[in-house]
């Protein structure tokens, strides 16, 4: 299978007026076409930095990143980035928020608009298209944010804690809906999360980063019975609790190391 994202010996140093700090070190990571991976690790270990490097928003100090075999030199059209906050424009309707990426790229053509309508339908948002963001719940707003991210048809979705601001019930419902949509459209996805159960339930692989500077500490391959279910059911699948315990123990071991 082809590697869609390929990070080779990537390190990044943030330089400020006061100091230079190594945020991530020697990251070697390959993500296959259609694969869903999660990045977990303690706060400040460099998860968001890695997403920003993949998106081409930060140039790594060392190493290379390739998307579909080509080096990333700046913001990449094949990458869609979805954040914890939805950043919807309050003065625009849901439809008008959803098409903003197409507008900026001057791609507002009927076939693209049709695709956005289809995405809104898949996300159960058709009836909300003429509403404004303040008229929507947090879960609905995140669904709009995903539609906006997918509207320009990126191949790779970067999801930076997209569920963390939601209540637990909404988060569980949204995990199922979003994973189903990502699978339907055969996207490759990288999720950053602090929630071990979410990481296991959504992913094919869970990558754990160690403490600052972030290095890959351990990789967990998610067994088929979990991968073949949607996240809510996956939490009951064979092997889920064992894997949860394994990831948790690795976090505890990291804590003890100080
Ligand atoms: N723009 C910046 N300038 C200087 N240092 C930064 C900058 N952004 C991040 N850092 C530092 O780099 C390290 C990694 O930060 P990053 O936000 O990537 O971690 P994270 O794992 O995503 O954290 P969290 O889980 O808390 O969101 C941290 O020590 C952080 O303080």
Image (tube, rainbow, N blue to C red):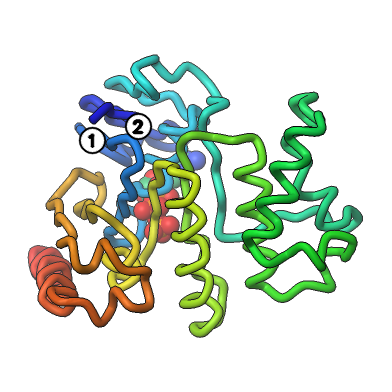
Asked whether mark 1 and ligand 1 are closer than 8 Å, the reply comes as no
Q: Label 2: state its secondary structure.
A: strand
- Classify mark 1: helix, strand or loop: strand
Image location (x, y in percent) of residue 15: 42, 31
Residue 75 is situated, as x and y percent measured from the top left of the image, at: 56, 26
Q: Which residue is mark 2?
A: 13
Q: Horizontally, is 213 left or right of 21 in the view? A: left
Which image quarter is the C terminus in? bottom left
Camera-near label (2 vs 1) is 1
Query: Residue 90 — which label?
Result: none
Q: Residues within 10 Å of mark 1 (few under 14, many from 20)?
A: some
Question: Tag on residue 29?
Answer: 1
The N terminus lies in quadrant? top left
Q: Is residue 115 visible?
A: yes
Q: CA distance from mark 2 to mark 1?
A: 18 Å
Q: Nearer the viewer, residue 91 or 231?
A: 231
Residue that appears at 31% across and 68% down: 229
Q: Residue at x 31, y 20 (%)?
A: 64
């Amino acid at each position: 299978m082809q590697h869609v994202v390929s990070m080779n010996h990537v390190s990044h140093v943030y330089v400020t007026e006061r100091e230079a700090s190594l945020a991530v070190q020697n990251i070697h990571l390959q993500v296959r076409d259609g694969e869903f991976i999660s990045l977990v690790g303690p706060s400040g270990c460099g998860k968001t930095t890695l997403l920003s490097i993949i998106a081409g928003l930060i140039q790594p100090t060392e190493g290379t990143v390739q998307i579909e075999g080509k080096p990333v030199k700046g913001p990449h059209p094949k990458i869609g980035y979805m954040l914890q906050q939805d950043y919807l424009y309050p003065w625009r309707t849901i439809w008008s928020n959803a098409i903003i990426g197409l507008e900026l790229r001057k791609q507002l053509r009927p076939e693209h608009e049709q695709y956005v309508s289809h995405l809104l339908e898949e996300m159960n948002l058709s009836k909300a298209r003429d509403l404004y963001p303040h008229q929507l719940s947090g879960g609905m707003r995140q669904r709009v944010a995903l539609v906006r991210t997918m509207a320009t048809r990126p191949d790779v979705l970067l999801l930076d804690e997209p569920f963390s601001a939601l209540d637990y019930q909404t988060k569980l419902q949204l995990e199922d809906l979003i994973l189903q949509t990502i699978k339907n459209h055969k996207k490759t996805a990288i999720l950053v999360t602090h929630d071990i159960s979410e990481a296991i339930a959504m992913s094919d692989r869970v990558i754990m980063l160690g403490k600052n500077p972030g290095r890959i500490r351990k990789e967990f391959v998610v067994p088929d019975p979990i991968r073949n279910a949607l996240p809510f059911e996956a939490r009951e699948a064979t092997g889920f609790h064992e894997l949860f315990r394994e990831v948790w123990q690795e976090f505890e071991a990291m804590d003890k190391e100080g």
